[in-house]
C-alpha cells in the first residue's frame, strides 16, 4: 500500500473533531496480515480532556451483529442449525406468529426461519408508531418496565425473555416477504443460547473472543477497565443532522448519558439481556482481530473460527431479487450492497457510495463504529467513535476512499 497516501486519514479525522462532527475517533488498517497504519484524534472524555487512544473501549451497538452472525455460522458448520430451521423449534413462543396484513393483524401463513433472522426479513423491527407491530416493539424497548428502564436500573430482563416478549406481538410483515432492520439478531442470540445450552456471552467467549485473543470484548466493562470506556456524545441541541451519517456539517458536541435499545449507558453491570444486535463493547485492536480472522478466511494465528468455505459464502450471500428491491428502497445509503448473515455485502461496486470491491462485507453501529472485510485484497478496516445517530458517516466514507486509493 501507499503508506504516504494513507497519512491523509489523520487530516480527515482531525478535521472532523475540529468541526465537532465527532468528539473522538480512531482507525486501524491491516493488509496481508500486516498493520498499515493507526490514527486517532479527539477525546474519549471531552470534559476531562482524556484522549481517544488505542486502548479506548467503545460500545459497538450494531457492530455486534456480525459477531452474532459468525456465532450462528459456527453452529451451521457443526450441523446444529439449518438456515431453514423454524425459530419455533428452539423458541416455542414463535409457534403461531401473527403479522400485519393490509393494516390488520392476521395469522402468518409461513413460519419464521433462522435465515429470516440472519437476513433481517423476519418482520422484527426497532419500533415506531406505524402499526401495532412497531408499537409493540416500542413498548418493549422504551416504555415503563421495558428494556431501557431495566438497563438503567433493575437489570432484570433476560435475553430469552426479550425474545419471548417480542413473539407476543405481530411481525411487521409476512416472514420472508420484506426487509426491515431491527431486533432479528437479538432473537438469534436467544436461539444460540438454546442450541448451545450456554449463556450467549459464554458461547461467544468460548468460540470467538478467547480464541482470537479479544481480551477487552464483552457485554459490560468491569471496574478495573472503566477508566478506558469512552463517553458518548451527540450533536448539540438545535444543530442540523446530515442524512445517513450524523451531523456532517459540524458544530458542537454534548454528553449523552441515556440507555438505548436496552444497552446500559455506563456498562458497569453484567447485563441480564445480552443483546446479539447491539450489546458488545470492544477496542479497535480487539475488533480488528475479528476482522482479520474473516479476511484470512476464518483463521488467525492458528486458531480456526470458521471454515474457509463458510467465509466465502458470507462474502457472496445476498437477498433474493424481490427482497433486494425492498433493501434498496429502505437502505438507499447502502446502494451497491445487499444484506445477508447480519452483514452488508457489496454486489455492485459501481453504485456504492464509497470506493470498494465486490464481495467486501461488514457493518457499522449506531455510535459510528465501522468495520470492513475485503478478502480479495486481504484488507481489514476498523474504525471506532462514539457519536449518537452516526452509523456510516461522511468521515467514514472519506477514510475508506483514502484506503482504497492507496492500494
Image: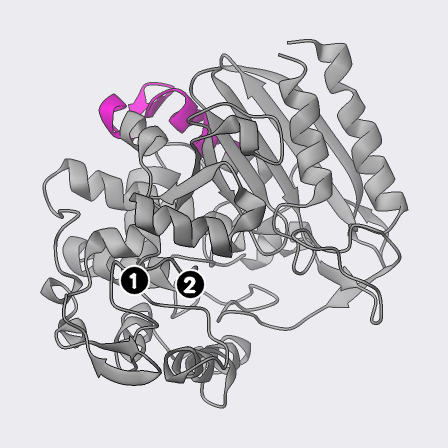
Residue 65 in magenta stretch: no
* Secondary structure under the numbered disc 2 in the rendered image: loop
Height in image: 141 above or below 174? Answer: below
| Picture quadrant of residue 67 | top left
Q: Position of residue 150 (x, y in %)?
A: 47, 80
Of residue 165 and residue 212, the one placed in the foreground of this image is: 165
Q: Which residues are magenta?
A: 288-310
Q: Position of residue 148 (x, y in %)?
A: 51, 77
Residue marked by disc 1: 122
Left or right of 253 on screen, residue 265: left
Height in image: 210 above or below 389? Answer: above
How far, Cα to Cα, is label 2 from label 1?
A: 9 Å
The number of discs equals: 2
Quarter of the figure that contains the N terminus: top right
Residue drawn at x 37%, y 79% as measured from the top left: 133
Dots 2, 1 in contact, CB < 8 A:
yes
Residue 301 in magenta stretch: yes
N-term mark: 2 or 1: 1
Q: Position of residue 285 (x, y in %)?
A: 56, 33
Height in image: 324 above or below 133? Answer: above
The label on residue 182 is 2
Mark 1 neighbour class, 10 Å CA radius: few under 14, some 14 to 19, many 20 or more: many
- The residue furthest top is 2
Amino acid at each position: 500500500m501507499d503508506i504516504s497516501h494513507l497519512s491523509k486519514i489523520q487530516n480527515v479525522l482531525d478535521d472532523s473533531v475540529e468541526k465537532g462532527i465527532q468528539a473522538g475517533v480512531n482507525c486501524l488498517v491491516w493488509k496481508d496480515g500486516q498493520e498499515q497504519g493507526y490514527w486517532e484524534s479527539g477525546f474519549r472524555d471531552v470534559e476531562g480532556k482524556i484522549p481517544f487512544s488505542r486502548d479506548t473501549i467503545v460500545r459497538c451497538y450494531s457492530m455486534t451483529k456480525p459477531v452474532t452472525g459468525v456465532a450462528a455460522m459456527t453452529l451451521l458448520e457443526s450441523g446444529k442449525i439449518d438456515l431453514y430451521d423454524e425459530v419455533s423449534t428452539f423458541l416455542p413462543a414463535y409457534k403461531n406468529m401473527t403479522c400485519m396484513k393490509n393494516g390488520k393483524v392476521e395469522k402468518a401463513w409461513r413460519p419464521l426461519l433462522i435465515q429470516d433472522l440472519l437476513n433481517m426479513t423476519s418482520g422484527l423491527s426497532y419500533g415506531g408508531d406505524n402499526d401495532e407491530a412497531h408499537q409493540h416493539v416500542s413498548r418493549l424497548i422504551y416504555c415503563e418496565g421495558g428494556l431501557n428502564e431495566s438497563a438503567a436500573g433493575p437489570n432484570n430482563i433476560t435475553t430469552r425473555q426479550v425474545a419471548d416478549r417480542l413473539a407476543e406481538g405481530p411481525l411487521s410483515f409476512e416472514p420472508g416477504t420484506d426487509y426491515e432492520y431491527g431486533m432479528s439478531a437479538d432473537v438469534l442470540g436467544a436461539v444460540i443460547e438454546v442450541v448451545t445450552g450456554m449463556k450467549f456471552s459464554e458461547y461467544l467467549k468460548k468460540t470467538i473472543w478467547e480464541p482470537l485473543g479479544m481480551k477487552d470484548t464483552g457485554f459490560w466493562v468491569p471496574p478495573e477497565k472503566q477508566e478506558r470506556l469512552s463517553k458518548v456524545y451527540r450533536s448539540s441541541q438545535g444543530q442540523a443532522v446530515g442524512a445517513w451519517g450524523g451531523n456532517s456539517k459540524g458544530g458542537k458536541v454534548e454528553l449523552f448519558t441515556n440507555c438505548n435499545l436496552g444497552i446500559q449507558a455506563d456498562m458497569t453491570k453484567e447485563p441480564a439481556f445480552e443483546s446479539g444486535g447491539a450489546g458488545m463493547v470492544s477496542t479497535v485492536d480487539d475488533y480488528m482481530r475479528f476482522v482479520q480472522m474473516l479476511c484470512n478466511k476464518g483463521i488467525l494465528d492458528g486458531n480456526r473460527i470458521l471454515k474457509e468455505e463458510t467465509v466465502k459464502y458470507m462474502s457472496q450471500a445476498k437477498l433474493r431479487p424481490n427482497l433486494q428491491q425492498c433493501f434498496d428502497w429502505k437502505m438507499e445509503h447502502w446502494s451497491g450492497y445487499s444484506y445477508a448473515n447480519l452483514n452488508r455485502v457489496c454486489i455492485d461496486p459501481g453504485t456504492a457510495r464509497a470506493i470498494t470491491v465486490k464481495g467486501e462485507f461488514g457493518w457499522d453501529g449506531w455510535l459510528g463504529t465501522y468495520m470492513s472485510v475485503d478478502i480479495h485484497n486481504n484488507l481489514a478496516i476498523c474504525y471506532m467513535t462514539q457519536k449518537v445517530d452516526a452509523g456510516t458517516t461522511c468521515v467514514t466514507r472519506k477514510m475508506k476512499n483514502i484506503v482504497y486509493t492507496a492500494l
